[in-house]
Amino acid sequence: MKVMIAVTHLLGTGHLSRALTLGRAFAQAGHAVTVVSGGMPAPQLDRAGLSLVQLPPLRSDGTDFTRLLTDGGEPADETYLAKRAAMLSDSLWTGQPDILITELFPFGRRSLSAEFLALLSAARDLPARPVVLSSIRDILAPPSKLSKAQRADEIVDDFYDGVLVHSDPQITPLDVSWPVSERLAGRLHYTGFVAPPAPLPHRGGIGKGEVLVSAGGGSVGQPIFRAAIEAARKMPDSRWRLLVGGSDAPARMDELRKRAQGWPITIEPVRPDFRNMLPLAGASVSMCGYNTAMDLLQAGTPGVLIPFDDGNEVEQTLRARSLAHLPAIRVLPSAELTGDSLARSVAAVMEHGPRVPAKQGFDGAHRTVEIALQLREVRG
């Protein structure tokens, strides 16, 4: 089978990371996979065994997801967007996939509706129409108006064979964050959580005993890093490592290094071996995106979660609340973030010590492959 996954991440890299995990699962099952990425390049992510097509990249203007910027920081004009749409459709016609997956759309990425709808229309016109699936995480950004949910229902009815929900309905059903209509409920396929295999401890011992501070691969998290430097000064017997992402990482690291001058705090770009550092770490300080939550559960690392809530975002707050009951997990709202509060939270989770790593319920990528192939078989 030939599989195409279309994804555009606009702020962090979580959407692309999850799409690549799905792609690797299809590839491991012997299928040819093309991932078409429309966000900023993220070379630190694992794309082994996959073909990656990079569209002219876009990013959001901070948390304003309606204002799309090019990699040069200019507003994306109609010509730029038309080039993206053409490349996306060309990739479809060239690849002639048996299975087409759109990540998040139509439950998000409404600012890119034109290119996604053009892709879906083109898929319907292929000589052999592919099975078309939407891939969504456990918690979505709730629609600001009911009409947005109704429009998503209409698009699903018109173009999709099913919606892959990467969650366990006994833990986080979709209606926690999204109004699930009767007609949408019949299209949902819960896969379980999507995560790579549990990380093995770093062979070189990197990260052992450290407080690892991360904020994903995007240009976010600077208040967390600044508070981490203040917290590190209050915990002189601990070792801290700050991993900074985004295209502006060099400038942001320069600012942080000036703040940390004279203190043994490691400040460096995001690392591809981050997951292998987690099992050895004394504690993790992070936001609470989907992939971060999966990593912490699988590694058992004590964690302080600071949910991303800029621009009235609620997704990460909802997810963090669902994890707050676990041992060695503290949730620290961004409004309460200071060097003092972070130091207290880190000390508390480190005192508790690591949890037993969770081992069940993370095979959502393989279950996604099974569901997609079953739907393809039904299609005939």
Image (cartoon, helix red, strand yellow):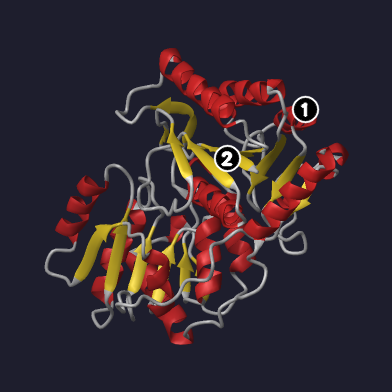
Which residue is located at x 38 percent, y 48 percent? Answer: 220
Proximity of marks 2 and 1: CB atoms separated by less than 8 Å? no
229 sits to left or right of 24: left
Q: Is residue 91 above or below residue 380?
A: above
Residue 238 tag number: none
**Quick one: which residue is furthest to the top in this view?**
79
Give how far across and how far down residue 86 sits, in percent.
50, 19
| Secondary structure type for disc 2 | strand
Q: Which residue is mark 2?
A: 5
- The amino acid on which the numbered mark 2 sits, given as a three-letter code, is Ile
Q: Residues within 10 Å of mark 1 (few under 14, many from 20)?
A: some
Question: Residue at left 60%, top 27%?
Answer: 116
Q: CA distance from mark 2 to mark 1?
A: 21 Å
Q: Determine the image quadrant of residue 55.
A: top left
Numbered tag placed on residue 154 in the rendering: 1
Which quadrant of the rendered structure holds the N terminus?
A: top right
**Image label count:** 2
Residue 15 rendering spot, x and y as whole percentages = 52, 46
